[in-house]
Amino acid sequence: MGDEPKLLRVMELTEKQDLPAGEFSLWLRRTRRALTTHSGVDVPCAGCNACCRSSYFIHIGPAETETLARIPPELLFPAPGQPEGSVVMGYDEQGHCPMLVDGACSIYEHRPLTCRSYDCRIFAAAGIAAGEDDKKLVTRRTLRWKFDYPGERDRIQHSAVQAAARFLPEHAQRLGDEAPSTSSQLAILAIKVYDVFLKIRDGYNTNGSIPPDPDVVDAVMGANEEFGD
């Protein structure tokens, strides 16, 4: 998997939380819908620009013509392994997005879909850090998110997402090409397949048995494929 995503300790997740992240079940439902529709999400950033200063490569599709028209061509290069016309925008020597001017996005109304769909609450949901040292600003923000649990099912669903995030790195070899290689990929995959671990919990409470790991891996791969469909 490359660099192993760092799991956040429970103490880290509970000592510093002061930013309302919303009701967990509602957030999870909206996030999964955004992943299937490739649409933007509404994140209560409150002036935070940590993701704009964290050495992210920004993918931009050929259909994003309004965005492309506002970015100098010299800042873009072909996106490897992507359809023709797809490009990537890099970052400066400080790890900042070149469109970040005076602490704000200079093309905010026409920012890339990658930026519109970015939600650092995925790391809080999965219980993992956002990445290595170049992502420490995002991890710092992650530690502050606090989800609400109006019902017991909210807590159960959150536990299932975190169970998925713990399971996936431990079985990367069995997952093959489906194995996530970054914290973002791990968090997103955990959100996509969390219901596998929800069913395991419900089944265990019913009959007291836990399926063997290979069966869980198969279920994860099936859930991921079904989610994509």
Image (tube, helix red, strand yellow):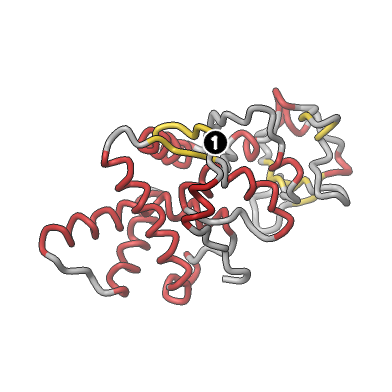
Residue drawn at the location 50% of the way across and 53% of the way down: 187
User: Picture quarter containing residue 43?
Assistant: top right
Residue 19, compared with residue 13, is above or below; it is above
The amino acid marked with disc number 1 is: Asp
Check disc 1 and report its element: helix, strand or loop. loop
Residue 75, compared with residue 223, is above or below; it is above
Q: Nearer the viewer, residue 148 or 165?
A: 148
Q: Position of residue 38 (x, y in %)?
A: 52, 38
Residue drawn at the location 50% of the way across and 59% of the way down: 9
Q: Nearer the viewer, residue 9 or 7?
A: 9
How many residues crowd around disc 1 within 10 Å: few (fewer than 14), some, or many (20 or more)?
A: few
Q: Which residue is mark 1?
A: 18
Q: Nearer the viewer, residue 9 or 128?
A: 9
Residue drawn at the location 73% of the way across and 31% of the way down: 67
Tally the numbered discs: 1
- Specify whether 84 is left or right of 220: right
Q: Quadrant of the N terminus?
A: bottom right
Q: Position of residue 106 (x, y in %)?
A: 80, 27
User: Picture quarter containing residue 63?
Assistant: top right
- Specify whether 63 is left or right of 134: left
Residue drawn at the location 53% of the way across and 41% of the way down: 17
Q: Position of residue 146 (x, y in %)?
A: 48, 39
- Specify whether 200 is left or right of 18: left
Q: Residue lying at the far left in this picture: please name it.
A: 207
- Specify whether 215 is left or right of 136: left
Q: Position of residue 152 (x, y in %)?
A: 26, 41
Residue 142, compared with residue 81, is above or below; it is above
